[in-house]
Image (cartoon, grey):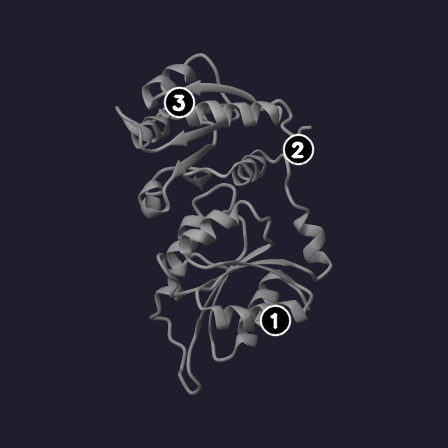
Amino acid sequence: MQTGASKGNTILLVDDEEHLRVTVSDFLTFQGYIVELARSGEEALETLESMTPDLIILDISMPGIGGMGFLQRLSRSAGASPPVLVLTARANLQSFFDGLDVAGFVSKPCEKGVLLAQIQHILGNNAPARETAVAGGVVHVLLGEDDPHMFEVLERLFTRHSHTVTRAENGPGVLEAAATVGADVVVLKQYLTKLNGSAVATLLRTMPSTKALPIVLYDFVGAGVIPTSSSPGAKAPVDRYVEAMEPSGVLEAVEQVLGIV
């Protein structure tokens, strides 16, 4: 039984690993997608001369021009290009987004459920009903917080206001979850493990699947400290940057951004 609403979309899967090509292709075909295969960036470029897929799933680490070379050539091609979902290791995340238009990424080894959720989100096959949820005052918060104690404090606070919370423990985790969990708002700690909140916000704004998500960036300051505009967070591309003395300041900023009274 198929679990995804594919609408007959065509996907070009580009990967030099035969086992991955076979298993992912079989899985996506079962979900109702039409899958074309390419073993390299060069082969993928040749394939695009004769067909235009709805989505490209691209491995970065391949011989020849590799995934990066393919993306660079795709960006220089005339006309609109299909969205690209990148398969990659988290450790190399930042470099993949530098000046390149990608719709999202999935970490390797690839979990089929995560991959399917990303595909559905990018292609609009399974878009969450965010407007209804926010209009009712109940939102799904994706919270980037690496301190377990502070996460529990904030989670209790949001839950008391009838909001649901998904936690991401570090910067790359926020990026991975943002395009898959159907959050209504991303709430980020400024000084976050592996990738600071301001950098995460910048990357979220580059991805078509997440660029419209409201983002609140926060930092906790001690009592009596006067907030300044010199913090890196103050210059981040977010809807609200807040230097809070109490966790309630984060909740207040989120509800103000979403227009919840």
Q: How crowded is mark 3: few (under 14 residues within 10 Å), some or many (20 or more)?
A: few
- Please indicate, yes or no, whether residue 101 appears anywhere in the rendered image: no
With respect to residue 34, does 83 lie above or below?
below
Residue ID for mark 3: 18
Q: Give the residue displayed 41% in from the left and 49% down from the top.
A: 203
Cα distance between the residues tagged 3 and 1:
46 Å
x%, y% of residue 60?
34, 33
Residue located at (35% from left, 57% from top): 194
Q: Is residue 107 visible?
A: yes
Kindly indicate the quadrant of the structure image that contains residue 157.
bottom right
Q: Report the amino acid beneath label 1.
A: Arg
Q: Where is residue 259 in the image (x, y as percent from the top left)?
A: 64, 63
Which residue ends up furthest to the front in the rendered image?
Answer: 19
- Locate residue 59, reporting x and y percent: 38, 31
Q: Which of marks 3 and 1 is nearer the N terminus?
A: 3
Q: Nearer the viewer, residue 215 or 165?
A: 165
Rendered view: 234 above or below 130? below
The number of numbered discs placed on residues in the rendered structure image is 3
Q: Which amino acid does label 2 sit on?
A: Thr
Q: Answer with mark 3 or mark 2, whichever residue precedes in sequence.
A: 2
Assign a secondary structure to mark 3: helix
Describe the element under mark 2 as helix, strand or loop.
loop
Identify the image quadrant of residue 256: bottom right
Residues tagged 3 and 1 counted as in contact (Cβ below 8 A): no
Do labels 2 and 1 touch, CB within 8 Å? no
| Residue in the foreground of this view, choosing between 144 and 24 | 24
Amino acid at dot 3: Glu
Q: Mark 1 points at which residue?
A: 156
Quarter of the image for residue 117 reads top right
Which label lies toward us, 3 or 1? 3
User: Which badge, 2 or 1, is on the more N-terminal residue?
Assistant: 2
- Residue 3 is labelled as 2
